[in-house]
Amino acid sequence: MGIAREILLRGSRSEWLASQLTRRRFTRHAVERFMPGEDAASAIDASESLRPKGIGTILTLLGENITHSAEADSVTQHYLDVLNRVSELSLDTDISIKPTQLGLDLDFDQTLCRYQTIISRAAGLGRFVAIDMEDSSYVDRTIELYRRLRADHDNVALCLQAYLHRTAADLATLLQLAPVIRLVKGAYNEPHNVAYRRKKDVDASFLRLADVLIEQASRANGTRAIFGTHDPRMIAAVCRRAEAIGLPREAYEFQMLYGIRREAQLRLAEDGYAMRVLISYGESWFPWFMRRLAERPANVMFLVRNLVRG
Ligand code: FDA
């Protein structure tokens, strides 16, 4: 793993750095590239502007590792309000939530209960709720959340990370549930014994897992494959493999982050692929922003250019 990536990922956990950088105007400028605004209304506006292009969205309120259950309750209420609002506007918009934002550090059962509340409301409104995957210390509990939620709901998706050595085995057992899986490479700083650290190994793992998902999705048994990646190589390989086994374009989905490879997003939607953009919003954007910088050195240069411009 690159030294720059390691430093940025460590920095993402620094409260001191967060308090220093979030106040600076140049950081805020750079953040705007990836985030239409700090409130849900901006994310909803951005969803409206993507609608005519045939691109759906997923909204996510930034914030993780909350420390009081009242905070998790208010996040729950926030998502219920967002679901109502996007339904009133008939937007093709789902939501995605980090388990620790609903209190996983505090209490498993209450976290499950909050997801149940949100997913039940979303089901009534014909929308999906995705469970994000955080660092490796949360994987067991997050998969357990998914198992319990999937038992009662069809409209729940789980994110799995290709960089983890364990993911192939996790996916194999999850397949019994006819799951909806968003496969990503993985964004956290994990040790060698837990995760592949070389890009080529992560990519190879992503493609192996993608093969399994595409094959399962082609059985029309309820398994749905979602690929959360900006990587042109991964996307081309997924399209080729799906085409080779006759899986129609609308039967699987690509997801990218707001502001990243916009032209590719448009092209995929125009070519008839299911395409969704994940839009983050909220005030707690520092750790998330640092993970975006770590993903791509060019993003750091973008920050530096903003620093120079003031
Ligand atoms: P990677 O970073 O390996 O880059 C490969 C290539 O993609 C680059 O060479 C370039 O061509 C292109 N590319 C990548 N970033 C670009 C950029 N900023 N601008 C232009 N081109 C770029 N992670 C996690 O741990 N848990 C989660 O729950 C989620 N959820 C999630 C949802 C969605 C919808 C997405 C898109 C991503 C996530 N992630 C995530 C993040 C994910 O794990 C990963 O860190 C990023 O997607 C970056 O990896 P890529 O696959 O995009 O390619």
Image (tube, rainbow, N blue to C red):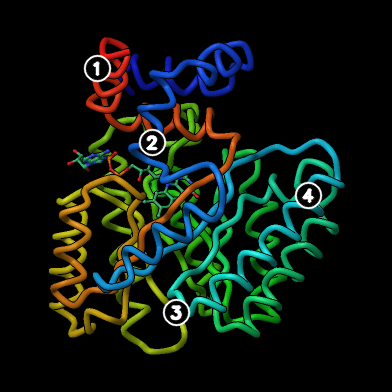
Q: Relative to residue 120, is residue 136 drawn left or right?
A: left
Does the CB distance between marks 3 and 1 fall below 8 Å? no
Q: Around disc 4, counting alpha carbons within 10 Å, would you say few (fewer than 14), some (14 to 19), or many (20 or more)?
A: many
Mark toward the start of the polypeptide (3 vs 1): 3
Mark toward the start of the polypeptide (1 vs 2): 2
Mark toward the start of the polypeptide (3 vs 4): 4
Q: Which residue occupies 86% across, 46% down?
A: 69
**Label 4 to label 1: alpha-carbon separation:** 37 Å
Pointer 4: what residue? 72
Pointer 3: what residue? 223
Q: Around disc 1, counting alpha carbons within 10 Å, would you say few (fewer than 14), some (14 to 19), or many (20 or more)?
A: few
**Label 3 to label 4: alpha-carbon separation:** 30 Å
**Label 4 to label 2: alpha-carbon separation:** 26 Å
Residue 170 location (% of width, % of height):
53, 59
Relative height, residue 209 to residue 274 (above, below): above
Pointer 2: what residue? 32
User: Which amino acid type is marked by label 2?
Assistant: Glu
User: Which amino acid type is marked by label 3?
Assistant: Thr
